[in-house]
Amino acid sequence: MLIRYKKSFEKIAMGLLSFMPEVSDVKMLQDIIREYEENADWHLLLWKEEDILGAIGVRIEDHEAVIQHVSVNPSHRNLGIGKRMILSVQEQYQANFHICASEATESFVSKCELERPSSQV
Ligand SMILES: CC(C)(COP(=O)(O)OP(=O)(O)OC[C@H]1O[C@@H](n2cnc3c(N)ncnc32)[C@H](O)[C@@H]1OP(=O)(O)O)[C@@H](O)C(=O)NCCC(=O)NCCS
């Protein structure tokens, strides 16, 4: 299930966000985490089973919820966690926001949407 980020998850969240291709160094990672902690329009959610296995970050811009980060622990990839995170965010935000992807997440978000059962589209 998706849970909200809190400071005690900082290290695991930074580890997950470091897999985003555009995250080039530790300073950038620290700036991203700080923005999620301080900016009320940046929401970081973590996928928790027994452990925390994934992270998904959303930026609110007017009526849009932009999925700007999505990352899964490499040992748990290709098991559907990434897709479940995208679908859970869509469920949580779709009543109030138009959901879209950033350039960084576009290819995976489009893949998940294409695979949605037609009854949910
Ligand atoms: C992208 C990511 C979150 C997917 O997580 P996951 O839990 O493995 O995803 P799922 O198991 O739900 O789906 C796996 C499918 O997504 C595909 N996929 C993986 N990365 C992808 C990408 N960047 N763009 C499109 N599809 C991608 C896999 O090839 C697999 O396809 P298949 O089902 O046809 O074999 C994970 O690979 C990751 O953390 N990557 C590093 C961070 C990253 O690049 N994030 C931005 C992605 S655009």
Image (cartoon, rainbow, N blue to C red):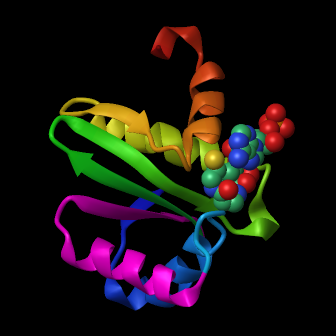
Tell me which residue sits at (49%, 81%) in the image: 29
Residue 44 included in the magenta stretch of the image: yes
Query: Is residue 24 visible to the viewer in this orientation of the structure?
Result: yes
Tell me which residue sits at (43%, 86%) in the image: 30
| Residue 33, horizontal then vertical, whole percent | 39, 79
Tell me which residue sits at (22%, 29%) in the image: 95
Q: Is residue 58 left or right of residue 40?
A: right
Residue sitting nearer the eye, 112 or 41: 41
Examine the image and state in which quarter residue 9 appears: bottom left
| Residue 50, horizontal then vertical, whole percent | 60, 72
Residue sitting nearer the eye, 93 or 42: 42
Q: Is residue 37 left or right of residue 107?
A: left
* As drawn, 41 above or below 112: below
Q: How many marks?
A: 0
Q: Is residue 58 left or right of residue 95?
A: right
* As drawn, 49 above or below 81: below
User: The magenta stretch spans which residues?
Assistant: 25-51
Q: Is residue 75 left or right of residue 120?
A: right
Examine the image and state in which quarter residue 83 appears: top right
Examine the image and state in which quarter residue 89 appears: top left
Query: Is residue 51 visible to the viewer in this orientation of the structure?
Result: no
Tell me which residue sits at (27%, 78%) in the image: 37
